[in-house]
Amino acid sequence: MVLDEISTSLIMWLFYTLIPCLLTDGVAVLPAPQNLSVQSTNMKHLLMWSPVIVPGEVIHYSVEYQGEYESLYLSHIWIPSSWCLSTKSPECDITDDITATVPYNLRVRAILGSQTSAWSTLKHPFNRNSTILTPPGMEVTKDGFHLIINLEDLGPQFEFLVVYWRREPGTKEHVRTVRSGGIPVHLETMEPGAEYCVKAQTFVKVIGRQSAFSQVECVKVQGEILPLALALFTFVGFMLILVVVPLSIWKMGQLLRYSCCPGVMLPNTLKITSSPQKLISCRKEEVEACTMSMLSSEELFRPGFSRPKEGPS
């Protein structure tokens, strides 16, 4: 009996002792998020934590950060994350919040209606120079005899170091810096029948680090078939021009000639069939005969006119 009373008293003491610790103004306190960590790859920073579970309820989270400047010069104030004032996901993209290469403190708390949990802080401050840099994605193609590379767009902070060479013994490597990705870049004019190889790596100036090189990609140019065919077509076209243009000019001249000055056939009566001397003598005799034989009527009846005697027939 005594033991029962002691047990009951102990249970009641524990109940009344622990319950006030779990209540704030009569409301149960939410547990704080646990296991905070930052996953950072290619300057994209993601704060993650274990979700708070409350059956039948949707928990929201709030994230704040504190950089070196806020810690040293602004009395340790905390700044709310621009993207995670109230998020349902147990993660937060803090890339836009991390603007300098200095240590950042990060913390998160759970929210359920008017209830809030205590803040959970990242154990070790995060510095963006610890981000993991991966080799860039790239596409190597050829446009005719032009070697083209298109690099993955990783953001304005990234530059690319591109190395390319002709694949044969003793060939010198060429190095070129590409300032941004997402745009096709011409590297070199290739020689027919040759194979060219390319590799690239990323470089981030603000943290002074670079990635490993990507895998080598190679492309090969066709042989001399295309240039020979192109030269043949050019020669044939040139010869056609040499033939067609003069012929067209001659034909146009003929058309203009017969259009402006058409040829007309003389009738047979106007054609000269005898020699010029004979024709002149014949015409002289005919004129004299006509002069002797053709008289006007006035001379015929004029007084004193004597008709000439005709000779013996």
Image (tube, rainbow, N blue to C red):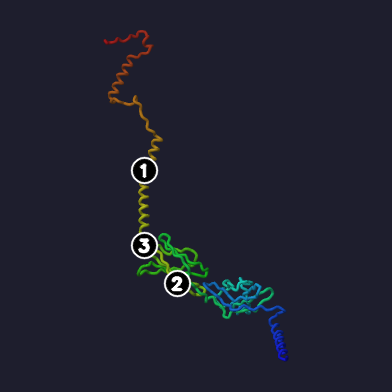
Task: Locate residue 259, reporting x and y percent.
Answer: 41, 35
**Disc 2 target residue:** 213
Q: Secondary structure at mark 1?
A: helix
Please state which of residues 72 and 122 is positioned toward the viewer in this rendering.
122
Front label number (2 vs 1): 2
Task: Locate residue 207, reporting x and y percent.
Answer: 51, 75
- Report the side of 149 relative to 108 (left or right): left
Task: Locate residue 133, reporting x and y percent.
Answer: 50, 73
Q: Secondary structure at mark 2?
A: loop
The image quadrant that residue 306 belongs to is top left
Label 1 neighbourhood size at 10 Å, few (<14), some (14-19), many (20+)?
few
The reply to whether residue 134 is visible in this rendering is yes
Identity of the amino acid at label 2? Phe
**Disc 1 target residue:** 247
Q: Residue at x 47, y 73 (%)?
A: 211
Task: Locate residue 27, reporting x and y percent.
Answer: 70, 78
Please state which of residues 301 and 225 is positioned toward the viewer in this rendering.
225
Query: Is 57 situated above or below 15?
Result: above
Q: Residue at x 46, y 68 (%)?
A: 177
Front label number (3 vs 1): 3
Query: Is 4 situated above or below 296?
Result: below
Instruction: State yes or no: discs 2 and 3 in contact (Cβ < 8 Å).
Output: no
Q: Which mark is residue 177?
A: none
Question: Which callout, 2 or 1, points at the residue further toward the start of the chain?
Answer: 2
Marks 2 and 3, Cα distance to the nearest angstrom? 27 Å
Identity of the amino acid at label 1? Leu
Q: Residue at x 35, y 56 (%)?
A: 228
The image quadrant that residue 58 belongs to is bottom right
Marks 2 and 1, Cα distance to the nearest angstrom? 63 Å
**Disc 3 target residue:** 193
